[in-house]
């Protein structure tokens, strides 16, 4: 086996047959680099910075290497060429795999990632109406309502005025 960083080998081999005849051959073995690379992601497609994979959101993974001329092929969950894999979180599983080829040498890598679900929100008002309307002076209480968020302490609230788009308050 040839170790990483091994240099080319040039040698001679002689084979002696049982009939008394022999043959000698010079040979050279060129040792090529195995493509070394990393998988980055999930990344925000607009900023290319790390992001959380929230169910239904768009994202991407990138295969990065220091070598030129590397051909990448994503093999899981889809088979497609290129160093970028675009995805929609939750629709293709939670593992990506890619193969890199450089001068006939092939290396593979995979990455597991977690898809998170957004908390469901229920609205409770003192008016006890079911159409999300309240009377002036009554209150509105927002609560996460499923097991994706174990308690209200794990949720950050941000109120935004839909008309102006301005942030009103936090928690």
Image: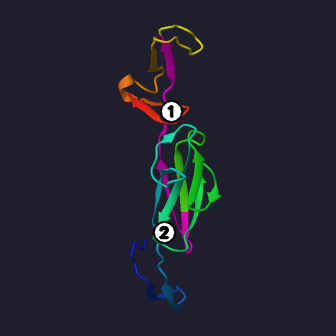
Discs 2, 1 touching: Cβ within 8 Å: no
Q: Pick whichever, 112 or 56, lies toward us.
A: 56
- On the picture, is 55 further left or further right than 151? right
Residue 135 in the image: x percent, y percent?
A: 52, 11
Can residue 158 be seen here? The reply is yes
Magenta-span inclusion, residue 119: yes
Residue named by callout 2: 35
Residue 29 in the image: x percent, y percent?
A: 49, 83
Q: Main secondary structure of the magenta part?
A: strand
Tell me which colouring the rendered structure shows. Answer: rainbow
Query: Does 168 appear above or below 52?
Result: above
Q: Pick whichever, 109 or 39, lies toward us.
A: 39
Q: Pick whichever, 29 or 133, lies toward us.
A: 133
Query: Does 148 appear above or below 64?
Result: above
Disc 2 to disc 1, C-alpha distance: 36 Å
- Magenta residues span 100-125
Residue 171 in the image: x percent, y percent?
A: 38, 27
Residue 101 in the image: x percent, y percent?
A: 55, 68
**Local secondary structure at mark 2:** loop
Q: Pick whichever, 57 or 124, lies toward us.
A: 124
The residue sitting at 46% across, 43% down in the picture is 52
The residue sitting at 53% across, 35% down in the picture is 164
Mark whose residue sits in front, 2 or 1: 1
The residue sitting at 64% across, 54% down in the picture is 79
- Tell me, for residue 117, which label it has, or none: 1
Mark 1, residues whose alpha carbon is within 10 Å: few (<14), some, or many (≥20)? some
**Local secondary structure at mark 1:** loop
**N-terminal of the two: label 2 or label 1?**
2
Query: Does 145 appear above or below 12?
Result: above
Mark 2, residues whose alpha carbon is within 10 Å: few (<14), some, or many (≥20)? many
Query: Does 116 appear above or below 132?
Result: below
In the picture, which quadrant includes the N terminus? bottom left
């Amino acid at each position: 086996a040839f170790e990483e960083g091994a240099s080319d080998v040039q040698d001679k081999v002689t084979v002696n047959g049982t009939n008394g005849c022999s043959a000698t051959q010079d040979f050279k073995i060129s040792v090529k680099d195995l493509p070394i690379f990393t998988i980055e992601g999930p990344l925000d497609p607009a900023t290319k910075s790390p992001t959380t994979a929230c169910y239904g959101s768009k994202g991407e993974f990138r295969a990065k290497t220091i070598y030129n001329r590397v051909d990448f092929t994503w093999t899981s969950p889809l088979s497609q060429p290129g160093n970028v894999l675009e995805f929609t979180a939750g629709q293709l599983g939670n593992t990506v795999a890619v193969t890199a080829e450089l001068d006939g040498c092939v290396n593979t890598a995979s990455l597991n990632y977690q898809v998170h679900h957004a908390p469901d929100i229920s609205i409770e008002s003192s008016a006890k109406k079911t159409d999300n309307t309240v009377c002036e002076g009554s209150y509105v209480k927002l609560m996460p309502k499923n097991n994706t968020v174990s308690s209200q302490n794990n949720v950050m609230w941000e109120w935004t005025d839909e008309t102006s788009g301005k942030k009103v308050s936090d928690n």
